[in-house]
Image (cartoon, grey):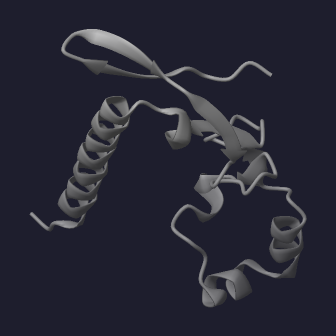
Amino acid sequence: MKTARLTIEIDGVEHELPTRLEVCPRCEGTGTHTNPNIDGNGITSDEMAELGDDFLDDYLNGVYDVACERCGGRNVIPVVDEARCAAHLLAAYREIEQAETDYRALCRADARMEY
């Protein structure tokens, strides 16, 4: 299977990072998950009861499943193989990842704000 390249840019130079395949955390290796339009915000037990037994049966039997958004149904994703990565590239990668994590957290906080 051909894996996606993971690269970072440092001072205008693109560097390819060594990768390994890991079980997709989104679908836990099944290749599918419930359509986020169905349960993206979670379904409470009260909502599930209101939707009825037929919905519950369909939900549990995968009727509302779609190909995983993260791995595209491949069950695995490429991740940086830190043991094989040069120290300076790994440090830069971690810095970029932290900045992206911080940005996503800021976006989520902003979305929760009442204006």
Q: Residue at x 18, y 58 (%)?
A: 110
Provide residue 57's location: percent of width, then percent of height. 89, 73
Q: Residue furthest top?
A: 13
Provide residue 105's location: percent of width, then percent of height. 27, 58
27 relative to 63 in the view: left or right: left
Q: Residue at x 77, y 38 (%)?
A: 73
114 relative to 48 in the view: left or right: left
Q: Residue at x 26, y 42 (%)?
A: 95
65 relative to 95 in the view: left or right: right
Quadrant in the picture for the N terminus: top right
Q: Nearer the viewer, residue 78 or 47?
A: 78
Q: Nearer the viewer, residue 47 or 74?
A: 74
Q: Is residue 80 above or below residue 7?
A: below
Provide residue 59's location: percent of width, then percent of height. 81, 67
Q: Residue at x 63, y 55 (%)?
A: 25
Q: Nearer the viewer, residue 9 or 89?
A: 89
2 relative to 98 in the view: left or right: right
Provide residue 67's location: percent of width, then percent of height. 75, 41
Quarter-wise, where is residue 100 in the image?
Answer: top left
Quarter-wise, where is residue 113 in the image?
Answer: bottom left
Quadrant in the picture for the C terminus: bottom left
Q: Nearer the viewer, residue 72 or 79?
A: 79
Q: Is residue 8 above or below residue 80?
A: above
